[in-house]
């Protein structure tokens, strides 16, 4: 069994032989990539005649190797992934101009939302805008197709070359949002329905039967919880930073509401103010720890929108989860010892 470093070197040395013949002269390298929330991944780069190529992260493949998947199967999987990306990629021919000329880049600039505390190294090297306990970063989209979107993060050096500041980038990104990544605001039950109905139909039900079963499964319609994202459901949490979006939501739900950061891709709107903010934070933390991938987590905090003040504010503070768990364990042990004495 190879360790991770040996595994990376093996893939680097053998991937070309697993690729189709047209890639036989390509060069292979492995580069560290800093992702959201301080996650560092190893990206396999296979370069040809141009400098644009998909990055295939090896960390997940090593987990498959540890789970018993043969090396030959892993190389074939990487080869298939790379080949599919190369065959369907839609990289514009003027990609270099996008990173050299602000007039070319302007309509492709978009923003994303990350946690400030969890990304100090990333934010140090990028122009950004503060938003409560979060930060807005900026990126240049270079391609978009059915497989996803490819973009280049705007670093301090790139921004300097383009002759723009964080303020300039924020203004450009805001102007682009309705056109490139329009807001989507939906009832939570509609979102759940869209996830469950296809699964029921895959099991052989007709659409009518699946919808009938869904209605039986969820007889109580929840009109108090909604999902805010964008039309691609990718990095859609950025819409919680826009005053016009927050005002529109207030009008639709009838006043004040809570905002729960589900992930970097979406946030949950809770229009029932009877909920306790600390209980909501417990729920956010639980979901983050158990269901959200580390690189997609946004925040453990809860926000509230005041419809009279027309303002979104942070209403909870950071908590030391590890300390709280340790305290719970101590309390459980004390209870055990107390019961044994009696």
Image: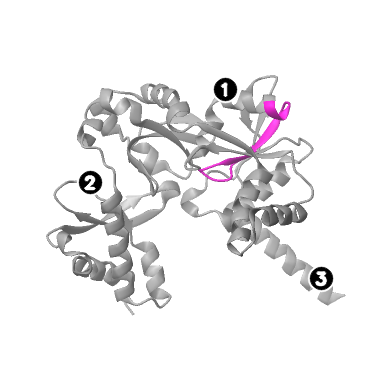
Where does the magenta region start and end? 252-268
Quadrant location, the C terminus: bottom right
Left or right placement of residue 144 versus residue 22 in this view: right
Above or below 226: residue 63:
below
Above or below 301: residue 136:
above
What residue would you read off at disc 1?
A: 244
Badge 3 crowding class, 10 Å Cα cut-off, few under 14, some 14 to 19, many 20 or more, is: few
What residue would you read off at disc 2?
A: 52
The answer to which quarter of the image holds residue 280 is top right
Badge 1 crowding class, 10 Å Cα cut-off, few under 14, some 14 to 19, many 20 or more, is: few
CA–CA distance between discs 3 and 2?
Answer: 65 Å
Indicate the position of residue 75 as horizontal and vertical percent values: 29, 69
What residue would you read off at disc 3?
A: 338
Q: Which circle, 3 or 2, is nearer the viewer?
A: 2
Task: State the SS at label 2.
Answer: loop
Q: Is residue 70 visible in the rendered structure shown here?
A: yes
Badge 2 crowding class, 10 Å Cα cut-off, few under 14, some 14 to 19, many 20 or more, is: some
Mark 3 or mark 1, which is nearer the start of the sequence? 1
Asked whether disc 1 touches disc 2, contact meaning CB atoms under 8 Å apart, the reply is: no
**Residue positioned most to the right:** 342
Indicate the position of residue 333 as horizontal and vertical percent values: 73, 69
Mark 2 or mark 1, which is nearer the start of the sequence? 2
Q: Residue at x 54, y 36 (%)?
A: 133
Indicate the position of residue 315 as horizontal and vertical percent values: 66, 35
Mark 2 or mark 3, which is nearer the start of the sequence? 2
Quadrant location, the N terminus: bottom left
């Amino acid at each position: 069994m190879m360790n991770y470093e040996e595994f990376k070197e093996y893939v680097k040395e053998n991937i070309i032989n697993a690729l189709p013949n047209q890639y036989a002269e390509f060069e292979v390298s492995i580069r560290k990539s800093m992702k959201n929330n301080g996650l560092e991944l190893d990206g396999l780069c296979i370069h040809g005649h141009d400098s644009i190529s998909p990055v295939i992260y090896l960390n997940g493949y090593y987990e498959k190797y540890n789970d018993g998947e043969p090396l030959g199967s892993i190389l074939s999987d990487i080869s298939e992934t790379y080949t599919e990306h190369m065959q369907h990629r839609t990289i514009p021919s003027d990609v270099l101009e996008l990173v050299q000329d602000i007039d070319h880049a302007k309509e492709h600039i978009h923003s994303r939302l990350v946690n400030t505390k969890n990304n100090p190294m990333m934010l140090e090297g990028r122009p950004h805008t503060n938003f409560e306990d979060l930060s807005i970063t900026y990126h240049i989209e270079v391609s978009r197709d059915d497989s996803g979107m490819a973009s280049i993060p705007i670093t301090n050096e790139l921004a300097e070359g383009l002759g723009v500041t964080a303020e300039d980038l924020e203004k450009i990104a805001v102007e682009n949002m309705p056109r490139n990544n329009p807001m989507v605001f939906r009832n939570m039950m509609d979102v759940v329905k869209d996830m469950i109905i296809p699964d029921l139909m895959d099991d052989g039900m007709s659409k009518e039967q699946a919808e009938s079963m869904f209605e039986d499964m969820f007889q109580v319609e929840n009109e108090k919880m909604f999902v805010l994202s964008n039309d691609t459901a990718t990095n859609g949490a950025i819409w919680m930073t826009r005053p016009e979006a927050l005002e529109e939501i207030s009008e639709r739900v009838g006043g004040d509401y809570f905002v729960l950061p589900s992930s970097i891709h979406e946030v949950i709107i809770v229009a029932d103010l009877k909920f306790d903010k600390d209980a909501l934070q417990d729920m956010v933390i639980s979901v983050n720890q158990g269901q959200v991938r580390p690189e997609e987590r946004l925040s453990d905090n809860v926000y509230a929108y005041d419809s009279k003040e027309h303002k979104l504010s942070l209403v909870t503070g950071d908590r030391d989860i590890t300390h709280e768990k340790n305290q719970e364990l101590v309390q459980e042990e004390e209870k055990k010892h107390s019961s044994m004495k009696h």
